[in-house]
Image (spheres, rainbow, N blue to C red):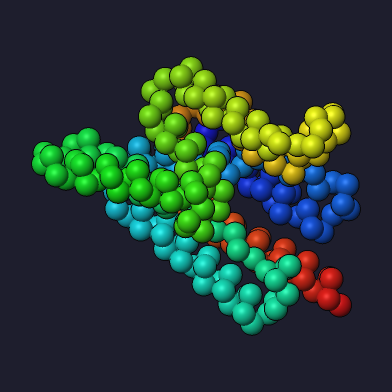
Amino acid sequence: MNGTQLKLIMMALMMLDHLVPLLPPQFGTPIHMLTRCVAVFFAFMAVEGFHYTRNRKNYLLRLYSWAAIMLLGNTLINTLMIHDPMYQIHNNIFLTLAIGVTILTLITFAKHAKSSFSKIAATILAIVLALVSFLGLIPAEGGSVVIPFMLLSYFFRDNAKKRDISYLIFAIPLLIMPILGLPDYSFEMIKLQLEVNPEFLFITVIPFIHLYNGEKGSNNPFFKYLFYVFYPAHLWIITLVNFYLNHA
């Protein structure tokens, strides 16, 4: 399957996940666990976009521009329409992807820089940016998973076996850490913790990555910008509907 086809599948899963507040409560956990592949798939495609784009500066500018649009829209909605913090919106995967691509840009620059100072400076900047994103010091949605995932996808891009193994190794601490220090290790307690912290399930993206045939898909501008428009639009609509249904 090409990139466009897989993105459409992921957009459907994304919308399903974001519809959870409007669905019966029993659907929330299974849907949330099912859709952990979505953000990392778009992160994988961002790495592919970084590799194939003819103009990396424009690509990076586009990501930051949409991150700014998303931030502005979120701020207006939260300030003017939704005063209850429980229902406010703070999602912005564009910023996370932009930070990830910035780190890849710095790494690539360091590889090809002739000056030792430039190499060292770019490397340090990349490491610092990766760390602050991973630690949540920058409000990057899902940064603790998405940023390392992008780095693994970049470094092992030409070796699918090593790439998949690196994903599995990264998933291990995400699986183990939530259950450390539990008062007891009963099945129900472990199950509850993993339902609340399902980040390790990002590995469900692996089959979708293997379905990807390396082709971009449609060159129609509609599909090029569909995700950029769909992501904020559907989130804003769902957020407003959820707020007004609960404040009628």
For this view, does 177 lie left or right of residue 3? right
Vertical placement of residue 247 versus 217, above or below? below
Can residue 94 be seen in this snapshot?
no
On the image, the x and y values in percent for residue 29 come to 80, 44
Q: Residue at x 52, y 20 (%)?
A: 165
Nearer to the camera, 110 or 39: 110
On the image, the x and y values in percent for residue 55 come to 29, 48
Q: Residue at x 54, y 41 (%)?
A: 145
Q: Residue at x 71, y 54 (%)?
A: 18
The image quarter containing residue 192 is top right
For this view, does 153 lie left or right of residue 126? right
Nearer to the camera, 100 or 10: 100
Vertical placement of residue 72 versus 106, above or below? below
On the image, the x and y values in percent for residue 15 come to 69, 51
Nearer to the camera, 18 or 201: 201
Q: Residue at x 84, y 46 (%)?
A: 27
